[in-house]
Structures are given as C-alpha cells and as structure tokens.
Amino acid sequence: MSTDRSITIQLITMILILLFACLPLFTFGSHLSHLPAERKACKSEKITYVPVEKDYYEEPIELFFDSGLNFNHIPVTKILKEECGLIDKEIPSLSRRDKRSPFARGIYRLSKYFIHFYQKSKKMLKPELLRSVEKVVEKLNHIKPSTGKVKFAGIGKFFREVWENLEDVLREENDDHVNVILEHTFRTSLQLLIHQNETSEMILNHPKILDKIKKRIPVENPALLSSVRVSSVECHPFHRDSQAVLYFKLRIPKVERLTIEKCDDIGTITENSYQFYEIPTATFKRNGHVFKVDLEKCVSDSFTFCPFDSIRPTDCSKEKLQHCNLKKEELGNFSRELQQGFAVYGDFKQILMEKNELQDLWLVKPRTLYHIIPQTNETITIGEKTLKQDTHSNVTVIRQV
C-alpha cells in the first residue's frame, strides 16, 4: 500500500516538474507567429534602390569645355589647364568694391551651397586654392553654415543653367559674388575630380555628363545623381582647338524599382494593457527573405531613392513576429499614429469628423480599441484631441479592433 502511494507521489512530482519546465514554451507560444490582417495598418510606396553595391554601368567620358565660357573673367579652358598642372595659375581674390545683393534668392542659395561644398572638401584641396576659397567664404559671412542633413533645392538646375546660358544667369543675379563663387566652385570641383576621383553637383550637371547618365538612370533625384562615381581620371594637354581635355569613366549604379509596405501593428487590449508589436516601418520580400528599409537614409525628391546601405535583412517583420518586441503600455486614454490612420482608445462615446466645413458624428462604444483612417484633409476630433493625416483615402474608416 505504501509502495503504491510512493509511486503515485513520484508520478505527480514528475508531472509537476514537466509542467513547470514546459511553462516558458506555453508562454512563448501565446505570442503570434505573424500579424493578423485585422491588426495591420499598412500602405504601399514605390522606391528606387541599389540592390547590389558594386554593380554599375561604366561609361567613358571625354570632357572639354566651351572656350568662350568665362568664370570671373577667366576662360574655363584656362582654369582646366591650370588645375591639370599644364600651366601656372593665379587665383584673384574678391575685391572689396564688388557689389553684393544679399537678398537675391539665387546668390543666397549658391552661397549657402558653396559654404557647404567648402566644408565638405576643404581637407582635400591644395593649399593655394584652399586659401583663396577661405577668403571668399569670409566675404560670405552673412550666410550661416548648414548643419545636419543638407538639401539645396534647385542647385542642380542652377548649374545646368550656368553651363547652358551663363550670361542670363549673371544678368538675373546681378551680383559679382556669383562669378567669384562659380570660379572657385569650378576649381574645387576639378581638384576633387582629378586628384580624388570625387564628383560634384557642378560636374554632374554638365550637359555632356548628364546626357550619358540619363540613358541609364533617372536624374531628377539629386541623391541618386550624386551616387554616380568616377574612375581613371586623366588630363590631356591638347584637344582639337589646342585646349585641355579630361578623360574618365563614369560609374553609374544599377537601380531597381519596387513596392515596399509601410506597416504598423494596430495592437490589442489584453490584461488591462495596450499591447502591440514593434515591427520595422518599411519592408519588402525578395527571394523568400524579408528586408527592412531605413527610410531616414532615403531621399524623396521627384521619387524616393534609397541607397544600398539603407536596406538590410531582418528577422522581425509582420510575417515573422517571433523576434519582434511586444510592447505593453498601461491602459488609459490614448491615440497612437500609425502608418495608415490611428489606434485610439478611451472613455469617449463619439467621434466628430469635419471636412470642407461639413461635419459628421459617429457614436462608438467607450473603452474599446478603434482603428481610424481619416480622409485626406479631414479632421477627426475625439474629446479635446484632433487627428489629421494625409492618407490619400476618399472614405473615412472607423473600425473596432
């Protein structure tokens, strides 16, 4: 009798040990393996990206300049000979008598670009050019240096106009600084090209180069255009009318266009808390793998361009949640903006919508999680909160989750 009782106790003990051992597995298994459709807040977007870092088109270039074109009263053909080391050079400084129109939009934009260009390239310039450029920068002390992510709207178009019709540009700007800045920008661009194999906006927007690039990739996005590289740069002393010429190869990245999904987990109300998975903002699938896109590194201008280093494989995605962080927040009145719409919860009993001075009222259950997608240009009012988002939606969606 005692033996049977002992065996029974041992069996119960073993079962309890097994149950406790398996508890973490049950807990882990309670997590979702993928995000259900009803919890997805998604929208799609097309991007252009570089799938392979060192895969590029190689285009030979023979670059020479119009002998009638002058920057700061110096023929560009002479400047090229000087920077190629074929003749000695003299770099004039900016006179105090030069007139300045600080309110002209073009000169302000060009000056700001020039200061940024100087900051980026000063460590690579030859001493005599660096000293001359620094004097010009001192003259532009009314322009504050840019910090962080710098954008110069229209600078590419400006340089295209310079190459195609310089006289009109100078007449429109009516500022002697423009001529001096153009000369020093051109000299800096040549030194970077010849000695560092580095491109600049001024060189890339030369018609001869731009036409070559256009045949391979779209050039409207300045970030994609700036990703073009050069190699094998050589100066040759004579060309046709006894002018210098540059030979080099363009390395134009091969790009692809695809559709990415920008998603958020709407979440759920569980155990007196609001829970949702933190998933990558933008992803796409390729060859059975999921990749995430770091949109902070992408540039939207005419279209969205994402460089090679903005895309990485990911173990966490809406298709595979096992490696995603499950965030839990204390339950209370809240509104959380999603990629498409808002997740809202609270004691409210009505939702007010307003667009073009027309109002509509929805009655809802309090303390219930809702997914709201407003129309474009529509304002959602919940209590004292107002919600607005450019959703490109023609209808309002209010859905209980």
Image (cartoon, helix red, strand yellow):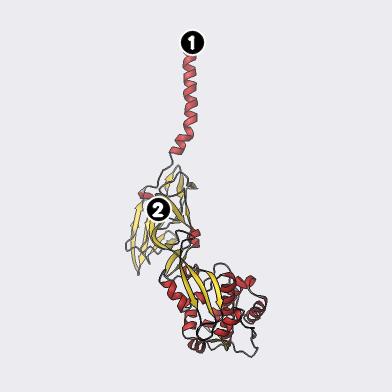
Closer to the eye: label 1 or 2: 2
Seen from the viewer's position, the closer of residues 255 and 45 is: 255
Q: Which residue is mark 2?
A: 285
Seen from the viewer's position, the closer of residues 291 and 366 is: 291
77 vs 303: above or below: below
Residue 47 falls left or right of residue 176? left
- Indicate the amino acid at tag 1: Thr
Residue 137 falls left or right of residue 271? right
Q: How many marks?
A: 2
The kind of secondary structure element at disc 1 is: helix
Q: Position of residue 48 (x, y in %)?
A: 42, 63
Q: Which residue, as the protein is rendered here, is positioned at the far left?
A: 395
Q: Earlier in the sequence, mark 1 or mark 2?
A: 1
Residue 108 falls left or right of residue 255? right
Q: Position of residue 127 (x, y in %)?
A: 67, 76
Q: Which mark is residue 386?
A: none
Residue 5 falls left or right of residue 111? left
Q: Which residue is mark 1?
A: 3
Does residue 104 appear in this view?
Answer: yes
Does residue 154 appear in this view?
Answer: no
Label 2 environment density (alpha carbons within 10 Å; few <14, some 14–19, many ≥20): few
Q: Position of residue 154 (x, y in %)?
A: 48, 76
- Indicate the amino acid at tag 2: Lys
Badges 1 and 2: C-beta atoms under 8 Å apart?
no
Q: Position of residue 342 (x, y in %)?
A: 41, 57
Q: Which residue, as the protein is rendered here, is positioned at the far top?
A: 1
90 vs 354: above or below: below
The kind of secondary structure element at disc 2 is: strand
